Amino acid sequence: MTLQNRVQPTGGVLAIPARGTLMGNRGILHDADQRLGVARWRHPHWISCELSFRGRHRAVMSPGAYTELFFLDEVTAMAAGHRVCAECRRAEYNAFRAAWGRAFGAPVRAGEMDRVLHAARVTRGRQQVRHEAQAQNLPDGACVLWDGRAHAVRGGALLEYTPEGYAGKLTLPHGPVTVLTPAPLVAILAAGYRPRWHESATRPAV
């Protein structure tokens, strides 16, 4: 059975075979039959983690254990509202926290970052919070909705997202666009944080 655990930049969670390059955690979201219920989080500490770390092994969606979520890459994870894990991705977490300090005046602890992020990424009705911005002002790594599909900003262009990788390249439009990446994470990217991209971002089909 293909499990429902693949997170999209738009916030949806799909049941598809592709697994991606990073894992995430929002708490226990599945039941004894490995099916997701209505809840899409159990705590505000949404993180993105390595697929493997210190030889630890997990059976995906085990009873009573947190629900393993998967992302194409960190750009996708950030669009969905996840920050870097402070344990398995310590060096990147330190870079993320430093960028937070540059963006907001001072680095803070993970719990405070999560409080700010949770308010900026999802509503009480489990809807993704989106905002408008000028496309030309967005940093690389921000995800937007364009022509009804998710795209990532990279090098003055838009890369079309698919669950398997980035599939196309468009010229960056002028004017306002709908931004999927939460505003605080856009600020982190603008402050110099460099997210981990899927390998297809360097060779998208034109």
Image (cartoon, rainbow, N blue to C red):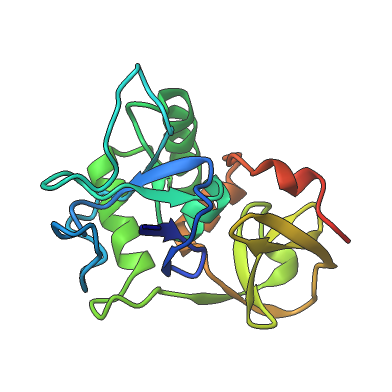
Please tell me which residue is depicted at 21% across the width and 74% down the height of the picture: 38
Outermost residue on the left side: it is: 64
Question: Percent x, y for residue 92?
Answer: 48, 30
Outermost residue on the top side: it is: 54
Please tell me which residue is depicted at 24% across the width and 63% down the height of the picture: 35
Please tell me which residue is depicted at 63% across the width and 52% down the height of the picture: 141
Question: Percent x, y for residue 158?
Answer: 75, 63
Question: Percent x, y for residue 80?
Answer: 44, 60
Please give the count of numbered marks on the rendered protein: 0
Given residues 55 and 158, the one toward you in this image is: 55
On screen, residue 87 above or below 195: above
Quadrant into which the N terminus falls: bottom left
Say which quarter of the image contains residue 195: top right
* Residue 200 as seen in the image, left or right of residue 144: right
Quadrant into which the C terminus falls: bottom right
Question: Percent x, y for residue 125?
Answer: 25, 81
Given residues 93 and 98, the one toward you in this image is: 93
Given residues 130 and 199, the one toward you in this image is: 199
Outermost residue on the right side: it is: 206
